[in-house]
Amino acid sequence: MVIVVGSGAGGATVAKELAARRIPVKLIERGPAIEEREAFKCYSRTDTEVAILRTVCLGGSTVVSAGNGMRLRCLESELRERNGIDLRAELDAAERELGVSVLPDVLFGEGTKRIMDAAMSLGFSMEKMPKFIDGARCKPGGRCVFGCPEGAKWTALRFVREAERAGAEVVVNTAVDEVVVRGGEVKGVRCGEKMIRDDIVVLSAGALDTPRLLEKSGLPASSDSLFVDTFITIGGVLRGIGLNREVTMNSYIGFEEFMLAPHFSNHLVSLLRQGGKGRGRGLDVSSSDVIGIMVKIRDEEQGEVKEVVSKGVTGHDAANLAEGASIAGSILEAAGVDPATFVVTPLRGAHPGGTAKIGVAVDRDLATEVEGLYVVDASVLPEAPGGPPILTIVALAKYLTRRLTGSCS
Ligand SMILES: Cc1cc2nc3c(=O)[nH]c(=O)nc-3n(C[C@H](O)[C@H](O)[C@H](O)COP(=O)(O)OP(=O)(O)OC[C@H]3O[C@@H](n4cnc5c(N)ncnc54)[C@H](O)[C@@H]3O)c2cc1C
């Protein structure tokens, strides 16, 4: 049997792939099983200078993803050239299975189109975002990052169900507290008082928990190299535009160090309404009057996951955020937004990674120095992708399965 810890992008994929090969799997998830439409209830925010977002539930953070799957920013060449990991076949398979494609024109709302036209008028080419959203089932309502009510977006819950159908045992509401290691070999995991024995364990608890589990067992991690793809959203008022009801981030402009994408955020509405001497504008606006552009950077790896998580902004990060915000501002102005209404959301990050890197915590086979203990989740990523990491994590989990099935058979 193989124990898989965590049921997000990495864990669900490895569980599904192993179960499909008739290898017994026990998938252990700390959070509850949920209805996809209720995923927002499982948000867990880690407050540091850059607030880190994730969801703790079956399916991990995939249940609230925006459905973005960009092959362009998936570290394919970095992993091949620097780490000797060729993921081409696995990424092809991941794109196929997740159903990555751009959405049909009818699913592009007025707000997104306004931003795309304005960007073009300034000489920027804004592309349609590749999505793992089924265009035939999608009914835009601005709910992607709360949990899709239509089930149109791929989430790891699909792989969890496939794993279960193939015989995997799925245990929820159960946190793994420790990986048990004796004499250089993994012996299983401990959940509270209970020891679950096995000689193969895959850690996929995500970039905030995997390094803690490794370090608790005396194993190396890279817990001081946390990146999160820090983002802000700059927005303003465009009465009746309705971006809040559209597919989020349905287009993008890619720059070397950052990307821009149409984005509505409730923070923008609060800031626009807020009066007084703060950053607010004291305006009478409804959500449908607000338009925004996200600036997401490839941040430097200066965050830490120790007992307390910390993640700030370096000078380099700040310069990229400022440059992105200035371009986003000019696009919004060209789209008809009065710059006097501009507000900017707090610093956030939704792609934590890099805390158990390939080359530090694991080798190119994703194996730790302990026999039978492997890691596959965002923590193994060697650097900030500056873009959506799910495709890469799914591909790495498929890559690991190939190696494990070699060792299991
Ligand atoms: C709002 C939002 C939007 C996003 N949009 C996109 C997008 O459009 N495209 C994209 O590619 N990425 C997106 N991401 C990022 C993406 O969701 C994550 O990068 C990805 O899910 C990380 O996969 P993972 O396997 O590392 O961790 P996760 O998917 O977070 O899974 C880790 C799992 O481990 C569980 N766990 C943790 N500790 C324990 C323990 N001790 N015992 C048992 N279980 C444990 C957690 O509960 C969780 O279920 C988004 C993230 C957020 C928050």
Image (cartoon, grey):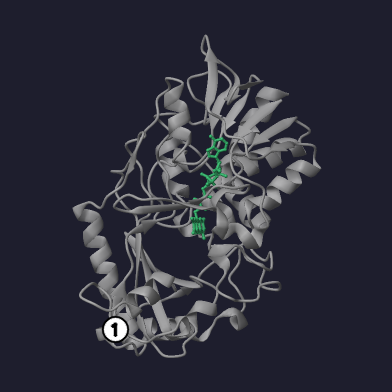
Q: Position of residue 132 (x, y in %)?
A: 61, 62
Return the residue at label 1. Answer: 341
- Residue 5 occupies quadrant: top right
Q: Is residue 371 left or right of residue 256?
A: right
Q: Is residue 98 left or right of residue 266?
A: right
Circle 1: element type? helix
The foreground one among 300 and 274 is 274
Q: Position of residue 108 (x, y in %)?
A: 55, 80
Q: Amino acid at mark 1?
A: Thr
Q: Is mark 1 within 8 Å of ligand 1?
A: no
Q: Is residue 355 above or below residue 146?
A: above
Image point (51%, 12%), residue name: 184
Image point (70%, 72%), residue name: 137
Q: Which residue is the extreme one toward the top?
A: 183
Q: Is residue 233 left or right of residue 393?
A: left
The quadrant of the picture occupied by the N terminus is top right
Q: Is residue 256 above or below residue 205?
A: below
> Could you tell me if residue 154 is visible in this image?
yes
Image point (23%, 66%), residue name: 322
Q: Position of residue 241 (x, y in %)?
A: 46, 87
Q: Residues within 10 Å of mark 1 (few under 14, many from 20)?
A: some
> Could you tell me if residue 362 is visible in this image?
no
The foreground one among 167 and 81 is 167
Q: How many marks?
A: 1
The foreground one among 187 and 56 is 56
Q: Is residue 138 left or right of residue 249?
A: right
- Residue 173 occupies quadrant: top right
Q: Position of residue 226 (x, y in %)?
A: 36, 42
The quadrant of the picture occupied by the C terminus is top right
Q: Is residue 201 above or below residue 338?
A: above
The foreground one among 195 and 320 is 195
- Residue 51 occupies quadrant: bottom left
